Every structure is written in structure tokens, then in C-alpha cells.
């Protein structure tokens, strides 16, 4: 069986590729018009290409056209879940079209290695859009391999991004980091206050 594997970035390629390459002939397709800005797109792509070159993995790139992503998610409005669904559909669809052109039997995606993605939405959208192109969608769930993917990508010194990819996700990720920072600070202050009260009570007892 020949599989065309959609890859979102180098770190996420590591484990899914190895898992699938044990059972089939696997080529990779970098199809990610969601990534913003262009410099980030190129950085993720170049990280992936450098690893693929070392590992002897063939990679096709779908030319970067961020307007495709903007049009695809336009109907989702502020609904993050719907936005991601549309994004999955777009990216897997680009790979499915490439797979149909190249005579591949099936399409899969590295997205399911990430605990931050929704495997059910990926499966539903992947199956739907692949059926339109007459290729099979391999529904995978590589999340249990995420810790190993993280370990390996760190060991390899790969670039590891801190947001999913689109412009809104960069803002959301920054907001979430800030919220965690504020929560940690509040927890430290609460612990200090509790310590102070304990000392004060002990002092009173003495
Ligand atoms: S958060 Fe990630 S999956 Fe969702 S729309 Fe943005 S790039 Fe796509």
C-alpha cells in the first residue's frame, strides 16, 4: 500500500512516519496554508525537509497560499472548533488531491500525534474529503507517541513551535501562556500567605 502522509511540521512527523513506514510505502506531503506568518511556514517546512533529507524520506510541498486558509475558515466565525474542522478539511483535502494525482492508495495525517488536536474531527473531515477524491483516509491516533516525539525532536535539536499555526492560534497560545503565568503567580502568593499565617500562628503559640 502507498500512503501519502500529511505532515504539519518536523517534530510531528517523527513518530507517525515510523509507525506507518513499518506497514506501507510512505511519502510525505507538506500542505499547510494555515501557517502564519510566511517566515514561520518556511521555518517549519525547512525543519521538516532537513530531517527528511537525512532520513531519506520523499516530501512533496503544496505551494503556500494563505488565502486558501482564510477562505476555508471564513464561515467558522469566532468558533474555534469549527475553524479547526475547516482547517483539517482544507489541509487533508490538499493532500487527498495530491494523492489522487499520484496514484496513492491512502492518506493519513501527523496531526493526530498532537494532544492539542481533535482526532474525531480530523477523522470525520478526513474521511469526508478523501472520499471526494476516491482515496482512503487512514484514521489514526498517535497521541500515545507524543512524549516520544517530544523527546526525539528535542534530542535532534529541531525547531519546536509554541502555537498551532494560524494567526488566531498564535494569539490564543500567548493568552493561554499568560493565563498560566498569572495562575502560577497567584498560587505562589497564596502559598506564601499561608506560610506567613502559619508562622504567625506558631509565633503566637510560642
Ligand atoms: S488552531 Fe491549528 S488546527 Fe485550528 S485553525 Fe488554527 S492552525 Fe488550524
Image (cartoon, rainbow, N blue to C red):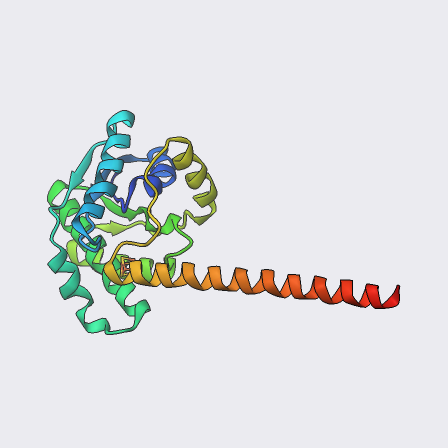
Q: Quadrant of ligand 1?
A: bottom left
Quadrant of image for the C terminus: bottom right
Residue that appears at 13% across and 59% down: 68
Residue that appears at 30% across and 39% down: 10
In the rendered picture of this protein, how many numbered marks are placed on residues? 0
Q: Is residue 142 left or right of residue 102?
A: right
Residue 148 location (% of width, % of height): 46, 39
| Direction right: furthest residue | 206
Q: Is residue 152 left or right of residue 47?
A: right
Q: Is residue 131 visible?
A: yes
Residue that appears at 80% across and 68% down: 201
Front residue (pair 13, 34): 34
Residue that appears at 82% across and 64% down: 203
The quarter of the displayed image where residue 1 is located = top left
Residue 93 location (% of width, % of height): 19, 55
The quarter of the displayed image where residue 169 is located = bottom left
Residue 100 location (% of width, % of height): 14, 47
Q: Is residue 23 left or right of residue 90?
A: right
Amino acid at each position: 500500500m502507498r500512503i501519502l502522509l500529511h505532515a504539519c511540521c518536523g517534530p510531528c512527523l517523527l513518530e507517525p512516519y515510523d509507525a506507518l513506514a513499518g506497514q506501507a510505502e510512505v511519502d510525505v506531503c507538506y500542505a499547510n496554508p494555515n501557517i502564519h506568518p510566511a517566515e514561520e511556514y518556511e521555518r517549519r517546512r525547512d525543519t521538516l525537509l532537513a530531517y527528511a533529507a537525512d532520513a531519506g524520506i520523499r516530501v512533496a510541498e503544496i505551494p503556500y497560499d494563505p488565502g486558501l486558509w482564510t477562505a476555508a475558515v471564513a464561515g467558522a466565525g469566532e468558533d474555534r472548533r469549527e475553524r479547526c474542522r475547516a482547517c483539517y478539511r482544507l489541509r487533508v483535502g490538499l493532500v487527498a488531491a495530491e494523492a489522487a494525482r499520484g496514484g496513492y492508495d491512502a492518506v493519513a495525517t501527523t496531526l493526530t500525534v498532537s494532544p492539542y488536536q481533535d482526532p474525531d474531527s480530523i477523522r470525520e473531515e478526513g474521511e469526508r474529503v478523501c472520499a471526494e477524491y476516491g482515496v482512503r483516509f487512514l484514521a489514526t491516533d498517535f497521541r500515545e507517541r507524543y512524549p516520544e516525539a517530544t523527546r526525539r525532536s528535542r534530542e535532534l535539536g529541531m525547531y519546536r513551535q509554541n502555537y498551532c499555526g494560524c494567526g488566531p492560534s498564535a494569539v490564543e497560545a500567548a493568552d493561554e501562556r499568560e493565563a498560566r503565568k498569572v495562575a502560577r503567580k497567584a498560587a505562589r502568593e497564596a502559598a506564601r500567605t499561608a506560610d506567613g499565617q502559619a508562622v504567625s500562628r506558631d509565633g503566637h503559640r510560642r
